[in-house]
Amino acid sequence: MSGHRTAPALGYAAFVQLRHHPYEQYAHARLGDLDLSRRVVQQALRRTELSWPAVLASDPDAFAWRVLGEAVADALARSARPGADALHRTLPARAADAALLHEQLGMPTGAAAELMGLGEPQLQVELRTARRLLTGTRSRPTA
């Protein structure tokens, strides 16, 4: 029966359809380079696809988000440019991700939490952490 896709393949295709654009927005915000962002997202999604049966046994959103974060960090490490995202140079990764998605990209908290594989209360904690740390950074006297 050629032409028929299996349920896991359809599930992965639906996952990609829902996540591809927000992943590219996130990667572009961090990398500052649209072409590089697209390549990094494709790499992360391919890695997720190759692990899809195991991913389904855990949390697909959390797994793919971790893979995307690693792919972006690897791209930044290989790049001569520091990237466009100062948040990740200042904050812990999850707090920076939450702030970038919600504050910079304007994503509703529920959507940002889902994208990251978190519950909305966890995302709210990360946003409070980001705000607290950023306020503390701004209020410190400079030498």
Image (spheres, rainbow, N blue to C red):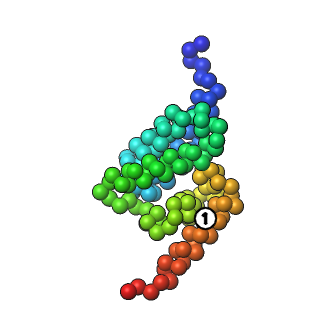
Amino acid bearing label 1: Glu
Neighbour class for label 1 at 10 Å: few (<14), some, many (≥20)? many
In the image: residue 10, left or right of residue 87? right
Which quarter of the rendering shows the N terminus?
Answer: top right
Q: Position of residue 71 (x, y in %)?
A: 44, 48
Quarter of the image where one finds residue 57: top right
Q: Position of residue 27 (x, y in %)?
A: 46, 52
Q: Which residue in the structure is indicated by mark 1?
A: 126
Q: How many discs appear?
A: 1
Q: Position of residue 54 (x, y in %)?
A: 59, 35
Which element is circle 1 on?
Answer: helix
In this rendering, is residue 111 above or below 59? below
The residue at 52%/43% (across/down) is 20
- Residue nearer the viewer, 41 or 50: 50
In this rendering, is residue 14 above or below 83? above
Quarter of the image where one finds residue 130: bottom right
Q: Position of residue 109 (x, y in %)?
A: 64, 59
